[in-house]
Image (tube, coloured by chain):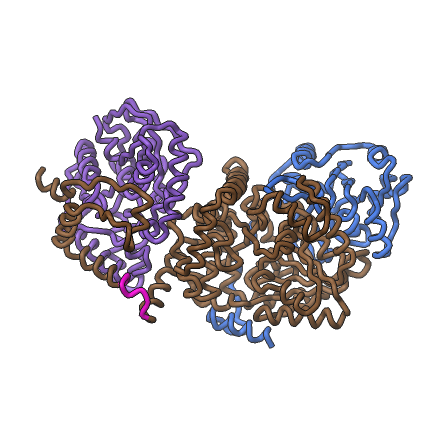
Amino acid sequence: MSTEFAQKSHDAMADPKLQLAIYTSTARLKQNRIDAVSPAALPDYQELRAHANAIKKHTIDNLDHYLEVFGRNVAAHGGKVVYCKDGTEVSDFVLNLAKERAAHLIVKSKSMTTEEVDLNERLEHHGLESVETDLGEYILQLAHERPYHIVAPALHMTRYQVADLFERELHAPRETVIEKQTALARSVLRQKFLAADIGISGANFLVADSGAVVIVENEGNARLTTSAPKIHIAVAGIEKVIPRAQDLATFLKLLARSATGQLLSVYTSFLSGPRRAGEIDGPDEFYVVLLDNGRTRLLPDKGKRQSLFCIRCGACLNTCPVYRKIGGHSFPWVYSGPIGAILTPQFMGIQHEPALPFASSLCGACGEVCPVKIDIPKVLLDLRSDVKKSDAREGRNRLEKLGFRAFAWLMTHPPLFEMAGRIGRSMGWPTSRKGPLGAWLSERDLPPLPAHSFREMWRRR
Amino acid sequence: MSRDNILHKIRTALGRGAGQAVADPPPARIRIPQVAMEDRIASMLERVRVLAGQAVVSDDPRAFVANAIAGKSAVASNAPFLAECGIAGLAGVRSGITNREELRQLCTTADIGITSADYALADTGTLVLFSSPQEARMISLLPPAHIAVVPRARILTGLDELFAVLPNPAEATSSMVLITGPSRTADIEQILVRGVHGPGLLTVVVV
Amino acid sequence: MGTRVSLFVTCMVDQLFPQVGMAMADVLERAGYQVDFPENQTCCGQPAFNSGYRAEARTVARHFLDTFESSETIVVPSGSCTAMVVHHFAELFHKEPDTLARAHSLEKRVWEFSTFLTEVAAVEDVGARLDRVVTFHDGCHGLRELGVKDAPRRLLSHVRGLELREMVPAEECCGFGGTFAVKFPELSGAMARTKIEAIERTGAQTVISGDPSCIMQIQGALTRAGSHIGTLHLAEVLASR
């Protein structure tokens, strides 16, 4: 295990304030979801999940087709699709456009996809001002931190930390009342919205038959980002596409309920192209950036392809007992929680953080709450096998491999298994805290070892 | 170009050829319940109120809105229904604007934005607004308060009915927005705050 | 279905909790079954499978298939081991048609203990008595992979003198996860502590579970915390008189 992962996990677990923040926030989100999808609240919940899974499966299995249909329909409504293989191509596109349009100020609404490629950093490196407008993301931008949670990015911060931050970065009088902190952010960001040249958003769904981008939010910053500036660029992973607008009747019923327990988010925008003739406001130019960034590498594996079904609701994070202890910043990439544990190895390579697929008790709670029925435990198990195969090829962890060979040998030779058990029971539990079992032994008191095994007792019956 | 490269990678990974036919997707799932109009209205009112919005049925929307905007500045959309109700002509209401910059300027200083709605969804208390020559995006977005005046016939049962009636919203407008309650966030300590960027006050008037 | 069942006690019960195996045999016999114990049994292979060692898991799984080839019905005092056999053997052998066929046949014959009683033996009252305030911990694999939720509760509802109180929150992992507990001891321990806090809030004297590994994890944490709360396997409770 990389010491970074071990260290960060340890630090998170050793911080009682952080533990309380993570626990209470996720507990609320978890319970809200349970209430919103209960049989009384949503009798069709399981059917909807199955349907969403079937649509995603069909779409991903035919992804090229739906991307092409999407592209044609975007163009038909006056927009333009730009395929980008990585973050460099995305920022090159934005920078070129900004140069051509003499644009300097960009407002951004929440997009994990742009976090993947550090878009803000790239743009700022080239002299553009790119401002996050979602309150949580804005706070993180000022703090130079990564999101802590897919849906609640500043979950780990207290109002006092926000007060310190605003005082320092906005040169405003210190304010610890949350409503007032929000009002301050609102007034600062309002100026940015109205002056911005370009608005960059993410997209929850790309609708193939409409050439439309669907954005789901609660604050209104995505609406402003996509309506106030003259240029709107939506950045989305290629896997976000769904076949029909009518499929939203399924997906929208699942997304907000799974994420926060709301029936629908406050604003759901369905945007197709720049403003039409006669429309009073809206952007004059509309671009959809379709990002690969490694998604095409996930496609060949039929068993793991389902990792791309994710609609980024965050339900798996809120229910995961591991995430709820180690928090979002222990994870090595932008995606955390169970979905992060399966995406990171597939995007970054399994040796990037080989401990990640193993940092799970396989309790299965994630798969149970996933609105699109990704079998996360199955993918974790497949990744574990991949890690061990890679280890074997590269000669890593030989001792562990030998250990399991010995295990298999012992378990196929019952008399030897029995003898090993008898010896072990007579020796007692190891008292030393050194060695591979040392830490495990430190955490718990062990059961007294029985005098006889079951099979010995059975024989004596 | 990246487009061809990426599409090629996708096809190779999926074992598909260029232009290869695609089996039909699973049928869209549209289930429209039978709900009487009085129940739709009741549901609409209840859902908006649960979200801390104000919701009323009014047979004199002009009077209601006049009262609501008394002493405040308002900008109204060019929706014919607002004109029919006599709202567009109320004192203190600016309406009839078609210039983007002028409208935006007005919306940044107005206390209240008044719109109609193209549809409403009863089961979630949602307003459906298209961007059009009649309805500008900013009116329901920039001012801190939003009043929507909606004829009851436009209240649908829910999302399923919306997408049954409108299988392709992109044919009608560049922007369809579903508005469900006032703007809100819980980003700091999960404490709910209303009116972050969009309006913190929402009033739905069913006519 | 005949009146004969074979026991797969699991490696953990065999070596660490033999009384659980004896209790299960006792309950099954009282329910009218003839019980046998195929001596060649060892393990279902889950530790290797969960650790990513599929070839080694296959070796052990093949041994399991051989051991239980002629057993019509196999009863197991563990949700996780049952789930391994019923859900993951097929995955292990998806490239070996003959073994795969044997695995599919085996799936139909393997039963988690509480499910066997309620669905196959069709019995809920096994005549048990235990004067205790208890709570029940749902092992994750049994719960989510096999749907074991009601069966243990129905059985416990007939135990005379028993008061069952549900944990809040319910259905949360105890943190064992097999080799997970060894690889991530601090995390596993933290999860166990959250679990015992929920247990303590119920005021129960004893935690019952259908999974020996969960029992070991929970008891370990309880003892370490200086708690007087004990643990029992469901089989032990049902065998109590």
User: Residue extending furthest bottom?
Assistant: B1
**Which chain wears purple?**
C
Magenta region includes residue C213: no
The magenta stretch spans residue A396: yes
The answer to whether residue A8 is left or right of residue B194 is: left
Q: Position of residue C34 (x, y in %)?
A: 15, 38
Q: On the rendered structure, is B131 left or right of A369?
A: right
Part of the protein shown in magenta = A395-401
Q: Which residue appears farthest toward the left when viewing the image?
A: A460
Please state, as top left, top right, bottom left or bottom right, where the N terminus of chain C lies in the image. top left
> Residue B71's image quarter?
top right
Residue A331: image location, x then y, percent: 48, 56
Up the image or down, A211 lies above or below A158; here it is below
Quarter of the C terminus of chain C within the rendering: top left
Residue C97 can be seen in this image? no
Rendered location of residue A131, percent (x, y): 69, 58
Indicate the colour of chain B.
blue
